[in-house]
Image: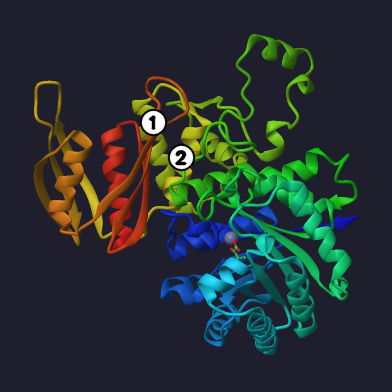
Amino acid sequence: MDKIIIFDTTLRDGEQAPGASLTQREKLEIAEALTYLGVDVIEAGFPVSSKGDFQAVRTVAKSIKGPIVCSLARAIKKDIDIAYQAVRYSKRPRIHVFLATSKIHMRYKLKKAEEEILRLAVQAVKYARKYCPDIQFSPEDASRSERQFLFRVIEAVIEAGATTVNIPDTVGYADPAEFGNLIKAIKENVSNINRTVIAIHCHNDLGLAVANSLEAIKNGARQVECTINGIGERAGNASLEEIVMALDTRRDIFTDLKTDIKKGQIYKTSRLVSKLTGFVIAPNKAIVGSNAFRHESGIHQDGILKKRTTYEIIRPSDVGFTQPSLVLGKHSGRHAFVTRLTQLGFHLKPKELEKAFVAFKELADKKKEIFEDDLVAIAEDQMHKQTRPLWQLVGFEVHSGTEVNPRAEVVLKHRGKKIKSVSSGDGPVDACFKAVDKITGISVRLVDYRLEAIGRGKDAQGAVSLNLVHRGLSFSGRSSSTDIIEASILAYINALNKIE
Ligand code: KIV
Ligand code: ZN
């Protein structure tokens, strides 16, 4: 069996998705979930890009045991120094150096000729090798690079000490047959290629990232770079869950290949990333979308009942997907609550459990039926509660209707002091946000606001995820409640507390 190395770049390329900024604590939480999922390499960030990114990579490198922790750098000494400083405390550090090799990038972006690029690539890999033995090199925009030059660069960086060579389809331009052929050509034309692992990194601009990755694997790539839910720069990266499940489901094609991913953790990890980045998953998203395993048409339902595999190629429970079932009610006790949470894969600390149980009872008073999704939302809310939030919601009141100008009164608590403000707005939510702005005095722009129902029924909870921009930086916030105005204010405050 050949192993396919799963290189997860959710925390680096994934976080480059506009609006997906994560705090250090959130990054660590995702890194822990990725470790539990069984990924082999975690690309934790691009440390030279900001102090926050440096700290996040350092925190992940220090805390995560198991996977290789990788740190990205341009082919510049300063970048490599900083990348190594960030990752040096990992038990298994990797430095990932990249430099563009396509004519368009060399001419217009780097303004350098081929020979200079070749020299810089070799120099950077040799320099990085002084720090650590695990070095990955990426010829950026490889799929649009002139082939003979690409082969020369790859050969030279392997000679200089690169242990993994990653072939990026940086702008998602490749077609599957063409990309597979490129990997084959690299294997046939680079004399020392057997001394390194061939990796691939595909973007999804034409919706082909997963197809291109799979074709590359068929042609000899043994490391695949991907992100949870396919998030990433522009249209995103190849999605981890789709690649892993394609390899698993089509074992007849991908014979003798395996990954170490624990499939049963996929759904939970996907939800965590969606929650922390504020990127809602489309219902029809393969593997992790809420409709991915729902059968609506009568013919399909009939077929499923007669033989599941007539219309189902993956068992939902294989990826940790559970149907929304009625689980607990108002009269359920602590023991049943804890047992159900444990079955759902949550291991809360005693204090979090206590608060989660109180939240469950409060919800059970408002809502007739409590579904698994509600329990997941409660558990996640407790796990992600800011420990000492600067701003807290005390209460609010809104006036809104067809004939009235929406108006809101909001009371917040700040360092033990209650502050009240009143504002009008375009709607009740807008009025609340304006009242909060008056209290905090923090200047923010709301760039994204989404509301989705958790579970079913008229009394379903509303989950709000939003993004605020403050001084050019993006902050996400999320919360849920049976009252969508309350969920909105709480999500807004959640984001504001991250700014603070
Ligand atoms: O898309 C790309 O080319 C990258 C490189 C840094 C690998 O993200
Ligand atoms: Zn990329």
Question: In the image, what residue type sits under mark 2?
Answer: Ala
Q: From the viewer's perspective, tell me whether residue 129 is left or right of residue 79.
A: right
Q: Is label 1 in a helix, a strand or a loop?
A: strand
Q: Relative to 142, does residue 410 appear above or below in the rendering?
A: above
Q: Is residue 221 visible?
A: no
Q: Quadrant of the N terminus?
A: bottom right
Q: Nearest the camera: 271 or 224? A: 224
The residue lying at 75 percent from left, 66 percent from top is 147
Residue visible at 52% across and 71% down in the picture:
108
Q: Residue 103 occupies which quadrant of the picture? A: bottom right
State whether residue 108 is above or below residue 84. Answer: above
* Residue where numbered disc 2 is placed: 377
Q: CA distance from mark 1 to mark 2?
A: 9 Å
Residue 336 coordinates in the image, percent (x, y): 54, 34
SS label for mark 2:
helix
Q: Amino acid at mark 1?
A: Gln
Q: Which residue corresponds to the image point at 39% horizontal and 31% vertical from the top-left?
A: 461
Q: Position of residue 175 (x, y in %)?
A: 70, 48
Q: Name the image quarter holding residue 60.
A: bottom right
Q: Are marks 1 and 2 in contact (CB under 8 Å)?
A: yes
Viewer can see residue 218:
yes
Relative depth, front residue between 178 and 76: 178
Give the colouring mode of the picture.
rainbow
**Image side of residue 333 versus residue 143, left or right:** left
